[in-house]
Image: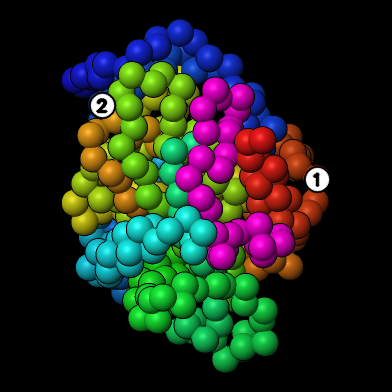
């Protein structure tokens, strides 16, 4: 396997305490380009044959339990809507700060919607604040193609900029596609866990389904302690990321090295989140990752965070517990966990 060292200033080991309570050690701050992140062809999940779907699930089991990250190709989602999201994002992020902050996420308690300004958060004791901004939105029953009518009474906390009335429809169109994809992927995950394919179906009728447009300005290459987003794990079940071609996403390997998740055109990057790691009793891995943008260009991405119904108890999947491997986490609902993590994240703001 060829490994190309990329020049970044510090090569000293670091110990980092994450928002989920984990303490990790990185051997170096230098990142590498490798082929360690698996590429999985998802064409088979649309086959009427169970063995074809199971073949994909077997690859997902291997990747999700070993590294917690993988690329998805031939996923069946029209990613042309991604470009519309980026176009709207650019217009929104170009607004004056005072206009963007009318939708500030702090104005919506216990939710992760609205605007996150540049330099809002300082993670893990870093000297510098995260150099990124985001526009966030979540589940809206009227746009759910399957359970919309059933969930029409659910509260929706989304806020939208009045300057761009067409923005909501374009963003929700891509959200709809990613919602359908994520429900399908949850069935493949069930097969990967040696459970019935529909095991998670009842738990994703009113899912956590949050989406965001991320903007990472160009970073100064000379700044060693600057991140677009510092080292963290995601806190829902899994995340589907659509990247532009710029790059910057990095994954922490089990050996403590940072691996570049180099963009592959038309692909998704999928990573397991903390909720699914808890529910699988640590069998699936919620892997630490970060974004560092030293490419000389601004970077955009659209992650979709998919989780379970908020009233679902995060009890372990039956195939992941036994007398010799009892449950490792205290019982709580998915909603309680997401609320806890969302508020913890908001508390990482710099003074």
Residue 281 versus residue 170 in the image, above or below = above
Q: Position of residue 317 (x, y in %)?
A: 65, 53
Magenta stretch holds residue 288: no
Is 207 positioned to the left or the right of 219 in the image? Answer: right
Q: Which residue is mark 1?
A: 330
Residue 306 versus residue 232 in the image, above or below = below
In what quadrant of the picture does the C terminus appear?
top right
Is 9 positioned to the left or the right of 190 in the image? Answer: left
Regarding residue 256, the answer to whether it shows in the image is yes
Residue nearer the viewer, 43 or 238? 238
Where residue 190 is drawn, which disc sits there?
none
Magenta stretch holds residue 127: yes
Q: Which residues are magenta?
A: 101-129
Identify the secondary structure beneath mark 2: strand
Q: Which residue is outermost to the bottom? A: 149
Q: Position of residue 44 (x, y in %)?
A: 28, 62
Q: Position of residue 267 (x, y in %)?
A: 25, 53
Residue drawn at the location 30% of the way across and 45% of the way down:
299
Q: CA distance from mark 2 to mark 1?
A: 38 Å
Regarding residue 280, the answer to whether it shows in the image is no
Q: Which residue is mark 2?
A: 33
Residue 268 versus residue 261 in the image, above or below = below
* Disc 2 crowd, CA 10 A, few/some/many (<14, 14-19, 20+): some
């Amino acid at each position: 396997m060829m490994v190309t060292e990329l020049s970044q200033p510090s090569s000293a080991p670091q110990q980092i305490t994450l928002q989920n309570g984990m303490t990790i050690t990185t051997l170096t701050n230098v990142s590498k380009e490798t082929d360690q992140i698996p590429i999985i062809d998802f064409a088979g999940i649309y086959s009427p044959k169970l063995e074809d779907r199971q073949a994909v699930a077997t690859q997902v089991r291997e990747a999700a339990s070993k590294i917690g990250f993988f690329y998805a190709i031939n996923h069946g989602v029209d990613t042309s809507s991604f470009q519309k999201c980026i176009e709207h994002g650019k217009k929104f992020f170009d607004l004056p700060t005072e206009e963007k902050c009318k939708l500030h996420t702090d104005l919506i308690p216990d939710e992760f919607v609205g605007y996150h300004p540049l330099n809002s958060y300082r993670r893990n004791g870093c000297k510098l604040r995260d150099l990124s901004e985001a526009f966030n939105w979540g589940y809206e029953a009227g746009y759910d193609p399957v359970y919309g009518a059933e969930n029409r009474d659910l509260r929706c906390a989304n806020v939208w900029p009045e300057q761009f009335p067409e923005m909501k429809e374009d963003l929700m169109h891509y959200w709809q596609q990613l919602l359908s994809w994520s429900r399908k992927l949850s069935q493949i995950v069930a097969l990967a866990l040696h459970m019935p394919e529909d095991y998670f179906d009842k738990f994703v009728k009113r899912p956590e389904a949050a989406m965001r447009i991320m903007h990472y300005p160009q970073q100064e290459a000379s700044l060693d302690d600057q991140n677009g987003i510092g080292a963290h794990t995601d806190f829902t079940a899994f995340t589907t990321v659509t990247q532009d071609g710029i790059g910057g996403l990095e994954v922490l390997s089990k050996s403590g090295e940072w691996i570049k998740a180099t963009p592959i055109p038309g692909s998704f990057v999928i990573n397991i989140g903390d909720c699914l790691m808890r529910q699988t009793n640590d069998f699936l891995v919620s892997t630490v990752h970060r974004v560092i943008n030293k490419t000389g260009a601004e970077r955009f991405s659209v992650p979709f965070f998919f989780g379970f119904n908020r009233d679902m108890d995060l009890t372990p999947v039956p195939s992941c517990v036994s007398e010799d491997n009892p449950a490792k986490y205290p019982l709580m609902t998915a909603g309680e966990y997401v609320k806890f993590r969302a508020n913890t994240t908001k508390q990482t703001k710099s003074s």
